[in-house]
Amino acid sequence: MNTFIGLIIIAAGSFGQSSSYVPINKVKDWSWESFWLTQGIFAWLIFPVLGALLAVPEGSSLWQVLSVDPAAALKAMGFGILWGIGGLTFGLSMRYLGIALGQSIALGTCSAFGTIIPALMKGTDLLRGDGLILLAGVCITLAGIAIIGFAGGLRSQNMTEEAKKAAIKDFALTKGLLVALLAGVMSACFALGLEAGEPLVVAGANDLFKALPATLMVTCGGFLTNAAYCLYQNGKNSSFADYGKKPLLVNNLLFCALAGLLWYCQFFGLSMGTSFLEPGSVMMAFSWCILMALNVTFSNVWGIVLKEWKGASGTIVLILVAGLAVLVFSLVFPTLFK
């Protein structure tokens, strides 16, 4: 029962993340870099700080929690800087491939690296016992994502250039695939950052929120990377003026804040959801892969809602549904061996 509750909470957070790119359509007359930096302030600074405060024991402070193990905090931030490259290119993959295909490829790569590398670092034998179940679960997840990616490739082949541009303004398949793969590899550093930040869990912290101080350090590192790039692009494209467009400021800040909140929901939900999983279990080790699989599932649902799959044949849609079904199965696969 606890496992089911944990999965529901993680799924709720995942739905938030997969919905976070929808408010982009409501941001008016801003360049990509201006939007990305502004939503990042909310997603990687403001909301993570508020979340981390929930993990502070009574009579203590957030600074004291983060100072429990300064080396662990800095290591988590270092992985966050690397993850920031993934987050930056992740946004670009949405730009070039759309929500459905872009997230599928990036998150598929991220799920594999972010699950297997921490397991190997803990000395898990992936060829026997629980390690083999974990590896099989990752493979099933990747199979589902590969099927979805195959459906996306078929859809792309059957679309005219005009149709591609109509569905995704800056569609570029080759560039998008390369960016999405890079995004996936680097984004896996978030999982490594959470592992590095485990010493920041202090006595008296609420179990539901205990991972959020480490999450804060990772997102702070990612913010540094993204802020540097976006400010560079602001200067290069002479888009600093975006922030001074007063008639649009309230509207754009509102939707950037909404995008940031929805994005942060995934890690807020991950922290809460994993508190219901048995420590050291296969499900706990598989939790990162579960989050990524759910992100892919919900992102493709949004892709359908936003008509990114409009005009696709019945066969292609059937392949897409088959891929989603495999992903759903991957979520419960480890529980079959309890």
Image: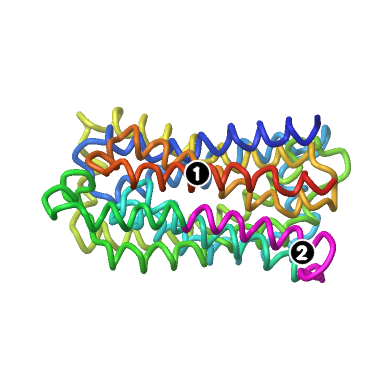
Residue nearer the viewer, 185 or 218: 185
Looking at the image, is 281 positioned above or below residue 254? below
> Is the residue marked by circle 2 packed among few (<14), some (14-19), or many (20+) residues within 10 Å?
some
Q: Residue at x 49, y 62 (%)?
A: 184
> Is the residue marked by circle 1 packed among few (<14), some (14-19), or many (20+) residues within 10 Å?
many
Disc 1 is placed on an element classified as helix
Q: Which residue is mark 2?
A: 132
Which image quarter: residue 89? bottom left
Residue 231 point in image, percent of width and height: 33, 58
Disc 2 is placed on an element classified as helix
- The kind of residue tagged 1 is Leu
Q: Is residue 175 magenta?
A: no
Count of numbered labels shown in the rendering: 2
> Quick one: label 1 or label 2, which is nearer the N terminus?
2
Q: Is residue 117 left or right of residue 16?
A: right
Q: Which mark is residue 130?
A: none
- The kind of residue tagged 2 is Leu
Q: Residue at x 80, y 35 (%)?
A: 206
Q: Is residue 250 left or right of residue 18?
A: left
Q: Residue at x 84, y 62 (%)?
A: 129
C-alpha distance separating marks 1 and 2: 23 Å
Q: Main secondary structure of the magenta part?
A: helix
Residue 95 point in image, percent of width and height: 29, 52
Residue 48 point in image, percent of width and height: 59, 42
Which image quarter: residue 311? top left
Range of residues picked out in magenta: 121-146
Looking at the image, is 214 positioned above or below residue 5? below
Q: Which residue is mark 1?
A: 324
